[in-house]
Image (cartoon, rainbow, N blue to C red):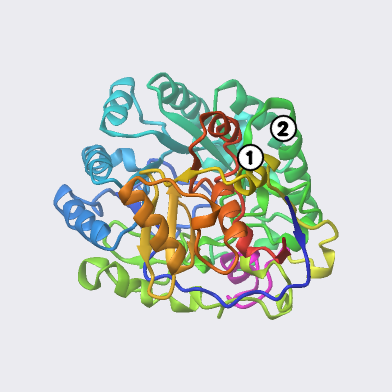
Amino acid sequence: MTIEKTDKKPKSKRVLTAPIMINLELTSGCNLRCRHCYNYWRADATSTRDKVTIEKMDRLIEIIIADRIFHIVLTGGEPLLNFETLEYALRRLTDSGISTSVNSNLISVSPEKARRLRKAGMDHVLTSLNSYDQETNDYMMNGKGVQARIIKGIRTMREAGIRVSANMIISEPNQDHVYETARLCARLDVQRLFATRLVPAVNVDDPGGTDLKLDKAGALKALDDMVRAKEDFGIGIGTLVSYPLCVLGDLQKYRDFVGRGCPAQRGNRMCLNANGIAHACTHEEVGYGNVFDLGIKEVFKNMIKWHDGSYRFAGCEGCGYIDICESGCRSAALAYFKNMNEKDPLFAGPENIHVPYRIDIPSEIDEAVDAGMYFSVPDRIRFRDEGNFYTINVRWANAFTIESDVARFLFERQSQRRPFNLNEMPGPDPRTALIFLVFKDAVEPVDEALKRTLAARPELGCSVDPNDLPIDV
């Protein structure tokens, strides 16, 4: 089955009752002062006075469980500076069925700490590595010898059995360093490299007049090198900050950078400071309330302008990819043009999309569905009732929305451990719904041979939600 772009109009936005994931800052303190850091307003970036205590963590976890948040990213500042709470949070969240990940620069990790974190439930860490070139990396991260310490930290984590991904903040100084940095990451057994465009802090009056900038040519050169690195080194690639899809143009070539969109506008994410103040985006200084006073859901409601399409750029109206792209990065628009509703600085216009995104669903899925083969709902699948629809969580922060009748059917079959086939699926188009659920790894074939075939394609579950595309099947 091949899914391609048509002229279908974007569907109305579904607003979630709570975030899917929370970036939880364990401390505002950090042992680095990167030149591009969005926490510019903190007077003393190294201070760890502002931190989450174990008592506060217990309170937060109770709220997280009650509001059915699926995934927590434990971050900072530098979370290793609040090690006891980090270790405790990993253990409690894991025991509570909440998936976790950690963001850390790794420069203070030791083999003993890595072993303790692995035992507590840590499976994955995202670290920062801005260049294979030591001088460039240390310039961007504002510290001597930083690159060598990060590399040592990566090796320490891998020796402890913890998966490592790396985030490369792309700007003028390192935009030509992507390929060689990917080579270094592959050599270090890093599973994925993110080429994340730099979003200047809003206190920078003219980002275009500094080396914090990244223009369209530089962005595409960096992404070209990422695509080449994936082919040459077998490393996974992606981005943590969306590129407007119109600047990509060829959505097949750059398919690894298509699906993320803006988590803040999609309503997927909440960012919590160590003091409990919440933000929709990690780059914004606006707070929407304290979760210790109001709770997660009430604070989340205060972010409604991020979730209802209010911040979309008018020039994106009519673009069939708006439900994925969300007008690109709103914080970048604010940094460059001092207005959240302005265009993304890399905006090129919907007409620049000359090769549409195409999802190639393996023929084995179509054939299995049409043959009446049976499927089951794994125990790892989690559901949340949003009122008029449900959110279904596949694993980690990978989640999407589905119709209520389908969700209730899947939940019932999961609870009863009863397989089902196409003839039992509810809804107006059960065939397409079932194919998409298999494709998104939300249901698994009972047949072991087919299960092994699909398991060999782990990118399936993390791919674009077909329902967000301007498509016909």
Is disc 1 placed on a helix, strand or loop? Answer: strand
Number of marks in picture: 2
Furthest residue in direction left, as rendered: 55
- Disc on the earlier residue, 2 or 1: 2
Residue 421 falls left or right of residue 80: right
Picture quarter containing residue 295? bottom left
Q: Where in the figure is residue 58, as x and y percent of width and height?
A: 17, 52
Q: Is residue 189 left or right of residue 21?
A: right
Viewed as shown, does residue 359 lie left or right of 189?
Answer: right
Quarter where residue 405 is shown: bottom left
Q: Which amino acid type corresponds to the residue marked 2 in the rendered image?
A: Ala
Q: Which mark is residue 237?
A: 1
Are circles 2 and 1 on residues that touch, CB within 8 Å?
yes
Q: Is residue 41 shown to the viewer in this render?
A: no
Residue 112 drawn above or below residue 465: above
SS under mark 2: helix
Q: Which residue is under mark 2?
A: 229
Figure check: 30 above or below 349: above
Specify whether residue 265 is in view. yes
Nearer to the camera, 140 or 164: 164
How crowded pointer 2 is (Cα within 10 Å; few <14, some 14-19, many 20+) is rated as many
* Crowd class of label 1 (few under 14; some 14 to 19; many from 20; radius 10 Å): many
Task: Give the Cα separation between the discs numbered 2 and 1.
Answer: 9 Å
Q: Which residues are magenta?
A: 324-346
Q: Residue at x 52, y 35 (%)?
A: 165
Amino acid beneath label 1: Ile
Q: Is residue 58 left or right of residue 247?
A: left
Q: Which one is nearer the viewer's eye here, 292 or 357?
A: 357
